Image (cartoon, rainbow, N blue to C red):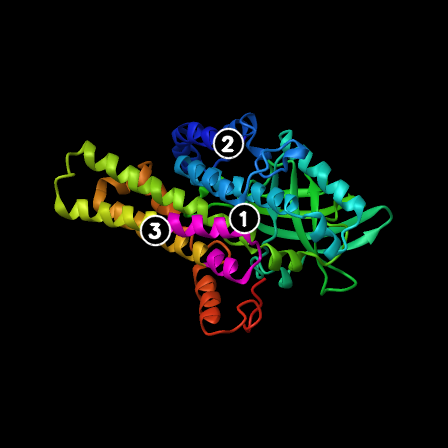
Amino acid sequence: MTVHALEAARRLAPRLAARAAAHDRDGSFPVDDFADLRDAGLFGLMVPRELGGAGATFAQYAAVAAELARGNGATALVFNMHASVTGALGAVTEELAEALGVPDEALAARDRLLRAAAEGAWYAVAMSERGAGARLSRLNTVYEPIDGGWHIKGAKTFCSGAGHPDGYLVAARSTSDPSLVSQFLVPAGEGITVEPTWDSLGMRATSSHDLHLDVTVPADRLLGGVEGLALVVAQLMPHWLVASYAAVYVGVARAAVAAAAEHLNARDLGGLPAVRARLGRADAAVAAAELVVAEAARRVDEAPGDADTNRWVWRAKLLAGTTAAEVAASMLEAAGTSATRRGHPLERLYRDARCGSLHPATSDVCADWLGVAVLGGDPDRDTATPRW
């Protein structure tokens, strides 16, 4: 099934690429791309087999995401959010559930959400907020218990896919105890308003608009069935908050190299030594980043949450973001001024690649985390500003 998923991603990539320019130009959401992902069964990629999904590993997800990103980085980025939700939910084993105190009814609710994904539902992430970024400990969106459920109120920003998914993973703080940060799977519909704010430099087709929530959800939409698990899960599964982006941006970087090669060959410029040298350095840089992402993914599958694994997770995000930006800039210079025209694939890829260092955790945050680790400290705690 997972081999089929990778083959499907490779088959879909040219189709995504053919639509990418128009969606980038218009800032429109690639609805047809997501219909293709649904038809290919990719929304169930991270869903366990017993619930109807492919039961993919993190490494297999990374391979699929990179292939999709070679077609359209924006589509792959939104898909990453869905994979992060389903991947994290599917990774809660019976042992972990028992350690976290997750009740049986919460596991049953989790299974219903995962089965829905295997059948074609997809989920977005509504975590970031203005003034707080992606730091869970600084959120202003709040929730409180009501009869039979929860009331959630607040505003989110950078919600990729806003207005299109079947549900949103929403992080919020308890009104009674602000130290408790919980996550809810909120169905799309009444009580959710999309404010069209996304008009960005890159990844323009992600429709990462603002989301306003004043909504009531049933009790079983509290993920894990226990309040206050959001920060715990962030510590246990940093790969879904950090390294999942990395696979997308190595795919974007690889696409930039391919676009530059096509442009240069079409103009018979491949005989210039300086051009060949740029392509060679770019190829080596992307290959190195791919290897680091692959190593991080392998370690996540073998020892998730382990200290050494987490170092590779942060390395992967740092190297993927910086490599994508540097490679795309170099390829644009190699191709020349004609490639900077709006609508040229390299111009779009340059802008998309530049976003890799900005996604949480940003490249500076990643480098700081790794620096604390090198100095022998605790990167998750030895900081004046909370990571999450």
Mark toward the viewer: 2 or 1 = 1
Image quarter (top left, top right, bottom left or bottom right) of the C terminus:
bottom right
Q: At 64% across and 52% down in the image, what residue appears?
A: 155
- Report which quarter residue 263 is drawn in: top left
**Can the viewer see residue 299 in this picture?**
yes
Check disc 1 and report the residue beneath it: 301
Q: Residue furthest right?
A: 147
Check disc 3 and report the residue beneath it: 288
Tag 1: amino acid:
Asp
For marks 3 and 1 on the same chain, the one whose residue lies earlier in the sequence: 3
Q: Which residues are magenta?
A: 289-314
Picture mark count: 3
Q: Is residue 142 left or right of residue 134?
A: right
Q: At 72% across and 51% down in the image, what residue appears?
A: 97
Q: Is residue 100 magenta?
A: no
Tag 2: amino acid:
Ala
SS label for mark 2: helix
- Secondary structure mostly taken by the magenta-highlighted segment of the chain: helix
Q: Nearer the viewer, residue 349 or 361?
A: 361
- Report which quarter residue 66 is drawn in: top left
Check disc 2 and report the residue beneath it: 5
For marks 3 and 2 on the same chain, the one whose residue lies earlier in the sequence: 2
Q: Is residue 306 magenta?
A: yes
Mark toward the viewer: 3 or 1 = 1
Q: Is residue 322 left or right of residue 46?
A: left
Tag 3: amino acid:
Ala
Measure the C-alpha gap from mark 2 to mark 1. Answer: 18 Å
